[in-house]
């Protein structure tokens, strides 16, 4: 495994500092004894850390002025054909059974379209986004 020389140099310097601190702090103590075991070494190097502590992620800063992404042909189709999709859902449950989900019905109607019709919806979505 080849390492970047700057990275290798940084690792070497860090390791050297780490071992120097350990030699100064634990001089004359036997490794593995109660005075120089893994727990005491970890506590020496990371006094504020407690196992199980969760790292809190910083919240993303959202720009309220950021322009919205344009809708795809599929999502624009679903948005503009809402009444037709709802009618298809109601027509699909005459026996009072569970109604199909909105997205499921939208997907079936979308798949029934030809490639040319889908491309038209993509163009309509692009035009609608540019008009805003």
Image (cartoon, rainbow, N blue to C red):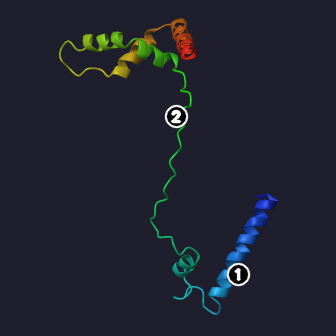
Q: Quadrant of residue 93?
A: top left
Q: Quadrant of residue 90?
A: top left
Q: Position of residue 9 (x, y in %)?
A: 79, 66
The residue shown at (73%, 75%) is 16
- Residue 105 lies, with reference to residue 68, above or below; the image says above
- The residue to which callout 1 is attached is 20
Q: Is residue 6 left or right of residue 63?
A: right
Q: Earlier in the sequence, mark 2 or mark 1?
A: 1
The residue shown at (67%, 85%) is 23
Figure quadrant of the N terminus: bottom right
The residue shown at (71%, 73%) is 15
Q: Is residue 91 left or right of residue 42?
A: left
- Residue 28 lies, with reference to residue 76, above or below; the image says below
- Cα distance, mark 2 to mark 1? 50 Å
SS at badge 2: loop
- The residue to which callout 2 is attached is 64
| Crowd rating for badge 1 (residues with CA inside 10 Å; few <14, some 14–19, many 20+) | few
Q: Position of residue 2 (x, y in %)?
A: 78, 58
């Amino acid at each position: 495994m080849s390492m970047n020389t700057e990275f290798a140099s940084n690792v070497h310097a860090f390791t050297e500092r780490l071992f120097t601190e350990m030699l100064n702090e634990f001089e004359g103590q036997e490794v593995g004894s109660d005075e120089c075991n893994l727990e005491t070494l970890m506590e020496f190097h990371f006094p504020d850390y407690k196992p199980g502590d969760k790292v809190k992620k910083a919240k993303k800063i959202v720009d309220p002025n950021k322009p919205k992404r344009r809708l795809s042909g599929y999502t624009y189709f679903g948005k503009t054909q809402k009444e037709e999709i709802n009618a298809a859902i109601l027509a699909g449950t005459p026996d009072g059974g569970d109604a199909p989900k909105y997205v499921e019905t939208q997907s079936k109607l979308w798949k029934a379209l030809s490639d040319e019709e889908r491309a038209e919806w993509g163009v309509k979505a692009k035009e609608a986004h540019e008009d805003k």
